[in-house]
Image: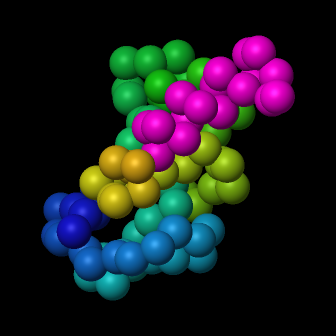
Amino acid sequence: MITCAFCNQEIEFEGRVSRNDTCPNCGCDLHCCLQCKFYDSGSYNECKEVLAERTIDKERANICEYFVLKGSKEEESGRKAAAKKALEDLFGKK
């Protein structure tokens, strides 16, 4: 169960979020910075993912490939995958 960053209502959502998915309660975009686990207003470009490209409008849908829906199951399992990818990028895949 996740919570919409705009209306604060709980949403049942399974699988990956596409660019076109919206909150069933308020209609706001789900695939946007404010709904992402990497969003941090105090970080550079307001994003904790250092490899992500800058996104100007944090409330609109975007095509960021690092997007992970805040509170999703993918967020929980994504940390291990992100760490593995970072190591492979750094040292090369064998």
Residue drawn where x is 42% and y is 56% of the image: 74
Whole-percent x and y of residue 5? 28, 55
Looking at the magenta stretch, what is its main secondary structure? helix
Q: Position of residue 49 (x, y in %)?
A: 55, 28
Q: How many marks?
A: 0
Q: Residue at x 41, y 70 (%)?
A: 28
Regarding residue 34, the answer to whether it shows in the image is: no
Residue 39: percent from the left, percent from the top? Answer: 42, 36
Q: Image quadrant for the C terminus? A: top right
Q: Image quadrant for the N terminus?
A: bottom left
Q: Residue at x 52, y 16 (%)?
A: 44
Q: Nearer the viewer, residue 20 or 79?
A: 79
Q: Is residue 47 magenta?
A: no
User: Could you say which is closer to the camera, residue 18 or residue 81?
Assistant: 81
- Model colouring: rainbow
Q: Residue furthest bottom?
A: 24
Q: Is residue 75 visible?
A: yes
Q: What stretch of residues is rendered in magenta?
A: 78-94
In this view, 65 is above or below 48: below
**Against 31, is 10 above or below?**
below
Q: Residue 87: within the magenta?
A: yes
Residue lying furthest front: 94
Left or right: 61 as drawn, with respect to 48: right
Query: Residue 73 appears at what percent x and percent y?
Result: 34, 59
Residue 87 as seen in the image, left or right of residue 6 = right
Above or below, 81 relative to 49:
below
For image coordinates 27% across by 78% down, the residue present is 12
